[in-house]
Image (cartoon, rainbow, N blue to C red):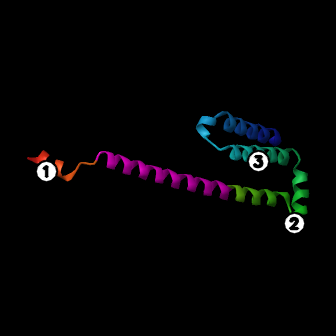
Amino acid sequence: MIQALLIIAALALAAYFLLNRRKAQAKAWVKIGFVLFVLAALWAIVRPDDVTVLANWLGVDRGTDLLLYVLVVAFMFTTMSTWIRFREQELRYARLARAVAIQNAVAPDEELQDRK
């Protein structure tokens, strides 16, 4: 039962991400990575023993530990990506504010004439 719910959730998330291209505005490599992540999640849900075998092959005792490590790395990637995106957004706002300030600047001589 839990496997069916997890599969439905993974497929729904993938469909939402891929169908809302305008909202997500993700680059192609991010979408490819996400699709691979969803496929790996589906594989882990359907065949959990394979994850343990893969974990043992990689030197990890349990498959759940391997999944935790992968999720930690994915979380770090997401956090860094979000931080970089917000930083770039702040720089764009600063450039826009500077451009608007320069465009609407009033020369000191004009300012004095307006007061008289």
Give the x, y percent position of residue 106.
24, 48
Say what amino acid the circle numbered 2 marks: Gly
> For mark 1, does the 10 Å Cα neighbourhood hold few (<14), some (14 to 19), or many (20 or more) residues?
few
Which of disc 3 and disc 1 is earlier in sequence? Answer: 3
The one nearer the camera, 43 or 5, is 43
The one nearer the camera, 22 or 60, is 22
Give the residue at x 79% y 40%. 7
| Residue annotated with mark 1 | 112
Say what amino acid the circle numbered 1 marks: Leu
> For mark 3, does the 10 Å Cα neighbourhood hold few (<14), some (14 to 19), or many (20 or more) residues?
some
Indicate left or right for 31 with 48 as reference.
Answer: left
In the image, farthest residue toward the bottom: 59
Indicate left or right for 66 with 73 as reference.
Answer: right
Q: Which of pointers 2 and 1 indicates the residue nearer the eye?
A: 1
Give the residue at x 58% y 53%. 82
Dividing the picture into quarters, in which one does residue 20 lie?
Answer: top right
> For mark 2, does the 10 Å Cα neighbourhood hold few (<14), some (14 to 19), or many (20 or more) residues?
few
Q: Which residues are magenta?
A: 75-104
In the image, farthest residue toward the left: 116
| Residue annotated with mark 2 | 59
Q: Tag 2, which secondary structure?
A: loop
- The N terminus: image quadrant: top right
Give the residue at x 41% y 48%. 96
Q: Tag 1, which secondary structure?
A: helix
| Residue annotated with mark 3 | 37
Q: Any magenta on residue 79?
A: yes
